[in-house]
Image (cartoon, grey):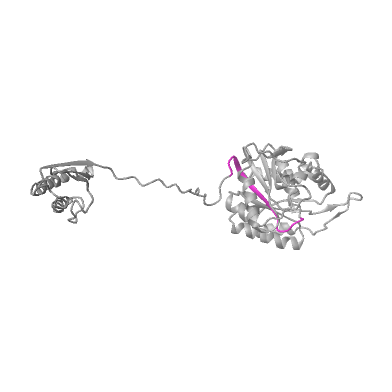
């Protein structure tokens, strides 16, 4: 009489699996594999066990052999103990999104970032940015100028730069350079008379590209010419890049100062230090008779700076030569570096260098 498979399984169910700790038998636990009962009554199977518990399973093997010996028709018992390691989890093939850095980050190669801002448009912020960048370069600093005024980019004209920036690999962008200043502007990507009609997300994406994908190289300071007001560009810059300080440009006119206060408050909320204020178009001297007059008032920015406890960096006059130089692509600090019109910008540059801000 040959032993049946059912009789063999019934006998094996009397043997407890020592690894479970719950009294589960070796059949129910799955440790017994590949059971074979041939016509001669030979019983063979494998017990897959954790190697660390080999001693306990030697006892279970002996108990199984003894139980099978009591089964009618079993002529031979062969039990093989085989060790196995824990099965490694399958690899996660889902695309993983790279962790985004939290908080403002340094731009590679750029030592300091100074934002040039204004609460209102038309106060000469871009003129100040271009002249300050050239003045810092003239004093030996490695200077970059980022034209972040996406809707009204004017730095290509002011620095006399034209042509489109190259991209050798389709990812990085090579900036333009003139007057010792490395420069990038959205104005280099569009025609001069073409409007940029973008919503906030596109605006912020363009700014981040100009900050991170442009090969700025090693810079002592990056001047960022911001758009007027307190909008998306200002917030994106302060949240994504480590801005070392901001300079507020305003005319002494009351309506300009109202918006300048809002700009200062914005930077305070964004925890960006105010390096100082500049009163632009402070005074006008007639080129014919030499009479001085204060077209937009006088002293308003000085009193505002005192109120906020920040330095008044300079009072820049309203002067025809400054305007002509900017429109001609060679700022007054480059075209007439020793002129009294350029002196104010050189003085601002020296103050920022002496303060360790540039």
Magenta highlight range: 107-122
143, above or below 264, in the image: above
* Nearer to me, 209 or 112: 209
Q: Position of residue 291 (x, y in %)?
A: 88, 53
Q: Is residue 96 magenta?
A: no
Q: Is residue 118 magenta?
A: yes
Q: Position of residue 236 (x, y in %)?
A: 61, 54
Residue 39 lies left or right of residue 220; in this view the side is left
Q: Is residue 78 visible?
A: yes
346, above or below 311, in the image: above
Q: Residue furthest right?
A: 288
At 67% from the left and 61% from the top, the residue drawn is: 262
Q: Position of residue 120 (x, y in %)?
A: 73, 58
Residue 154 lies left or right of residue 246; in this view the side is right
Residue 276 lies left or right of residue 157; in this view the side is left
Name the quadrant of the C terminus.
top right
Q: Position of residue 41 (x, y in %)?
A: 13, 44
Res. 181 image quadrant: top right
Q: How many marks?
A: 0
* Nearer to me, 203 or 329: 203
Q: Is residue 309 visible?
A: no
* Nearer to me, 49 or 179: 49
Residue 259 lies left or right of residue 270; in this view the side is right
Res. 345 image quadrant: top right
At 84% from the left and 53% from the top, the residue drawn is: 284
């Amino acid at each position: 009489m040959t032993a049946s498979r059912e009789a063999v399984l019934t006998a094996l169910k009397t043997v407890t699996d020592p690894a479970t700790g719950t009294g589960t038998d070796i059949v129910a636990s799955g440790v017994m594999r590949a059971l074979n009962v041939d016509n001669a009554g030979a019983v063979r199977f494998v017990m897959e066990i954790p190697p660390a518990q080999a001693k306990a399973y030697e006892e279970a093997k002996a108990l199984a052999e003894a139980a099978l010996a009591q089964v009618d028709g079993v002529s031979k018992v062969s039990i093989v103990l085989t060790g196995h390691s824990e099965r490694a989890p399958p690899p996660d093939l889902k695309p993983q999104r790279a962790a985004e850095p939290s908080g403002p980050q340094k731009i590679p190669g750029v030592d300091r970032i100074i934002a040039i801002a204004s609460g209102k448009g038309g106060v000469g912020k871009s003129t100040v940015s271009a002249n300050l960048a050239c003045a810092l370069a003239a004093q030996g600093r490695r200077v970059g100028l980022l034209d972040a005024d996406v809707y009204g980019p004017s730095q290509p004209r002011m620095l006399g730069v034209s042509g489109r920036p190259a991209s050798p690999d389709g990812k990085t962008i090579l900036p333009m350079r003139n007057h010792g200043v490395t420069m990038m502007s959205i104005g280099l990507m569009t025609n001069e008379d073409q409007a940029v009609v973008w919503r906030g997300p596109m605006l912020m994406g363009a700014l981040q590209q100009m900050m991170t994908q442009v090969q700025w190289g090693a810079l002592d300071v990056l001047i960022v010419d911001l758009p007027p007001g307190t909008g998306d560009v200002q917030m994106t810059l302060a949240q994504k890049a480590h801005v070392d300080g901001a300079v507020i440009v305003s005319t002494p006119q009351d309506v300009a100062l109202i918006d300048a206060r809002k700009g200062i408050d914005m930077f305070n909320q964004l925890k960006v230090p105010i390096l100082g204020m500049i009163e632009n178009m402070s005074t006008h001297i007639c080129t014919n008779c030499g009479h001085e007059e204060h077209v937009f008032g006088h002293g308003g920015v000085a009193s505002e700076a005192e109120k906020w406890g920040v330095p008044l960096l300079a009072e820049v006059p309203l002067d025809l030569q400054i305007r002509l130089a900017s429109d001609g692509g060679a700022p007054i600090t480059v075209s007439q570096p020793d002129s009294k019109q350029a002196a104010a910008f050189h003085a601002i540059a020296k103050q920022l260098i002496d303060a360790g801000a540039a």
